[in-house]
Amino acid sequence: MKIGVINVTEAHEKRVALTPDAVKKLRKLGFEVIVESGAGREAYYTDSAYEAAGAAIAATDAEVLTQADIITVVHDLSPEQISQLTTGKMVIGMLDPYRNTNLDAYAQQGVTAYAMEMLPRTLSRAQNMDVLSSQANLAGYKAVLMAANEYARPFPMFMTSAGTVKPAKVVILGVGVAGLQAIATAKRLGAVVEASDLRPSVREQVESLGGKWLDVPMSEEEKSKAKATGGYAWTPSEQYMKDQAAVVDKAVSNADIIITTAQIPGRNAPCLIHQATIDKMKAGSILLDMAASTGGNVEGTVSGETIMTGNGVRIIGAANIPALLAAQSSDLYANNLVNFIATLVDKDNEQAGSAPNLAINMDDEIQGALAVTHASQVRLQRR
């Protein structure tokens, strides 16, 4: 049973699906590993490091696609690569399933495709496979450093003989994994941090990191509704949305740096900051939009570009931040994949010294959730 790794061809992508350490772990499980030459170069993993870990090196992606039973990827394969796959092969990676136009092709080829973004994140046994969290954690950290680099002033307060330098005011919109890491990083750098989210349940987490919660008044009915859903999947009233917009508008208008993190799987990112608010911001302020690749949380965002508004505000369309920390993000991502692959092994019928047998079970709550194609069928319920 052989697992393959190929070069990533997407622009701005430097990550690799498996690292040499991951190869060692897979070898211990009984798998062989084949890696396309140069696949880890941008993440600082050399071919010789893969060979030392026990992997074979292939000259082309075609060799990997032909020989490997399981192909691990960072992003989706191209249509040409998919056409080279044969029935029974598997593809595992971040496949962006709701936007993926290749699912029918996978099904036609008889390929089982596992989209790691579909992981049921509430399952305790799935936590070590959560690629969204591992990558978002690093992205939240790096986003603050990117904003600090663009900001023309320091983050912390300075007391000098020439006067006092006030600390930067940072606002984080969206308090998921990336948002919480952004709060922690900005606080470590000495900024004053405020944060907002539609889920009132995260207030305690924000405050535990030293951030100030941007409070929006809620009716008793809304409090009950939010509490009953754990803060997820509740629909705020029109009045609550208006009140929240007013609170956010005031905070953003007075901030030096705003980092937005809100994304919705399978849909365009919600617009949180409109031009009317941007027009109120002071020159030199920074808007870093972590959702730029899915439409953006900031009106006027351009993915992969930094633009300057007429009033001197810089909007950074941050595309693929984890790739800027390619070595570490690849390492965490590879661990996520290894942990998932380990669940595919049929441990009840293992034989010492032999290649692992796989136990593919679409009734399993993890496998069934991740499999977007199987048995020549598209399993994903498209939105």
Image (spheres, grey):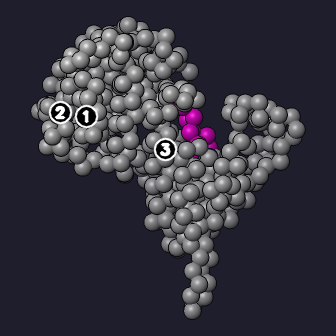
The residue shown at (66%, 49%) is: 205
In the rendered structure, which amino acid carries the disc numbered 3?
Ala
Q: Say which residue label 1 marks.
A: 23
In the rendered structure, which amino acid carries the disc numbered 1?
Val
Vertical arrangement, residue 6 with respect to residue 365, above or below = below
- Residue 254: image quadrant is bottom right
Quick one: which residue is furthest to the bottom in this view?
Answer: 161
Tell me which label, 1 or 3, sits earlier in the chain. 1
Residue 249 x, y percent position in the rendering: 71, 55
Q: Say which residue label 3 marks.
A: 136
Mark 3 lies on a secondary structure that is helix
In the rendered structure, which amino acid carries the disc numbered 2?
Ala
Magenta residue span:
261-271
Given contact means CB atoms under 8 Å apart, are the residues at marks 2 and 1 in contact?
Answer: yes
Q: Say which residue label 2 marks.
A: 55
The residue shown at (40%, 22%) is: 343
* Nearer to the camera, 58 or 297: 58
Badge 3 crowding class, 10 Å Cα cut-off, few under 14, some 14 to 19, many 20 or more, is many
- Residue 228: image quadrant is top right
Disc 3/disc 2 C-alpha distance (Å)? 29 Å
- Lateral position of residue 205 relative to residue 18, left or right: right
Badge 2 crowding class, 10 Å Cα cut-off, few under 14, some 14 to 19, many 20 or more, is many
